[in-house]
Amino acid sequence: MSELNLLVVIGSTRPGRIGPTVAEWFVDAAKAHGGFQVSVADLAEEDLPLFDEPHHPRMRNYQNDHTKRWSEKVDAADAIVFVIPEYNYGLGAAFKNALDYLHHEWNYKPASVVSYGGVSAGTRSAMALTGAAYALRLFLVPAAVNIPFVHSLVHDGQFQPNDVTTAAATTMLDELARVAPVMRPLRNA
């Protein structure tokens, strides 16, 4: 079987964010896992203003170049991992906006979350994603990575996972590798 295209989306855009540091670790873990061709979409670099398309995303009648680029990236993915923090018990605005730009591109794709934060490990943002995922026919696998007290695991600018975090990443990647090939025909139907 050919390698699966795994898109890792960095969902935080604020200055001083730790998302890219966590994502760098996860991308390395995914590459080491094998079976995935890994690409990264950093929402801070995607240049997606507040949703500005004149047509509903279900129509796929995109007028703006930034939407067309975003659509191509998401459409090419066989599986998606969102690296997201928690903002006030929920999803960050830039991340939710990026989800809302598209519809069909998310359909019938397995996805999961690497959430991070303080004591709650960003899990409330992961839970907030379930409603949007349901509407987008995006299938969240049960295996996820939740990182509490994330700043305590960053040393010299590098995320240093503990054994629990490393094991969770392996379990998640195993699950995505198992589910993605099965869901591919659903997208092509």
Image (cartoon, rainbow, N blue to C red):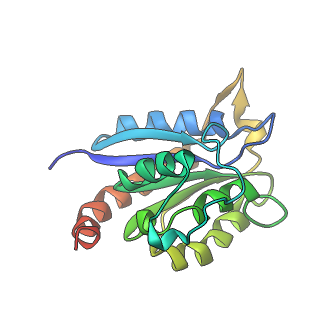
Eyeballing the image, is 96 above or below 15?
below
User: Going 80% across and 56% down the picture, which residue do you hit?
Assistant: 119
Eyeballing the image, is 37 above or below 145?
above
User: Going 70% across and 46% down the picture, which residue do you hit?
Assistant: 12
Q: Can you see residue 126? A: yes
Q: Nearer the viewer, residue 165 or 65?
A: 65
Q: Quadrant of the C terminus?
A: bottom left
Q: Quadrant of residue 56?
A: bottom right
Q: Is residue 5 left or right of residue 124?
A: left
* Residue 90 in the image, given as x and y percentages of width and height: 76, 66
* Residue 29 in the image, given as x and y percentages of width and height: 45, 38
Q: How many marks?
A: 0
* Residue 58 in the image, given as x and y percentages of width and height: 47, 73
User: Going 54% across and 52% down the picture, which residue do you hit?
Assistant: 67
Q: Nearer the viewer, residue 143 or 181?
A: 181
User: Going 54% across and 35% down the picture, which residue do you hit?
Assistant: 25
Looking at this view, name the residue that lies furthest to the top.
156
